[in-house]
Amino acid sequence: MPISATKLRQDLYNILDQVIETGVPLEIARKGHIVKIVPENRKHVFR
């Protein structure tokens, strides 16, 4: 179930961390459209 853009804005960094940790894409509802945040599937690159 998508979350609202307002909810995303309120807790952005925790939500992004959750997507990274779980690997589960997140759907955001905005103006009748759905936008997804999807973690990239790649190995960590150490700089």
Image: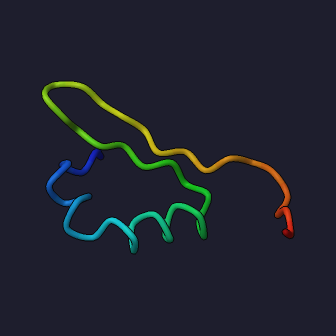
**Residue pictured at 55% horizontal, 45% vertical:** 38
Furthest toward the bottom, the residue is 14
Image location (x, y in percent) of residue 3 = 24, 51
Image side of residue 16 versus residue 7, left or right: right
Image height check: is 17 above or below 34?
Answer: below
Image side of residue 40 versus residue 4, left or right: right
Task: For the C terminus, give its image quadrant.
Answer: bottom right
Q: Coloring scheme of the render?
A: rainbow
Foreground residue among 7 and 47:
47
**Residue pictured at 82% horizontal, 63% vertical:** 44
Image side of residue 19 versus residue 30, left or right: right
Image height check: is 3 above or below 21?
Answer: above
**Residue pictured at 33% horizontal, 65% vertical:** 12
Furthest toward the front, the residue is 47
Image location (x, y in percent) of residue 32 = 15, 25
Image location (x, y in percent) of residue 8 = 26, 58
Image side of residue 36 versus residue 46, left or right: left
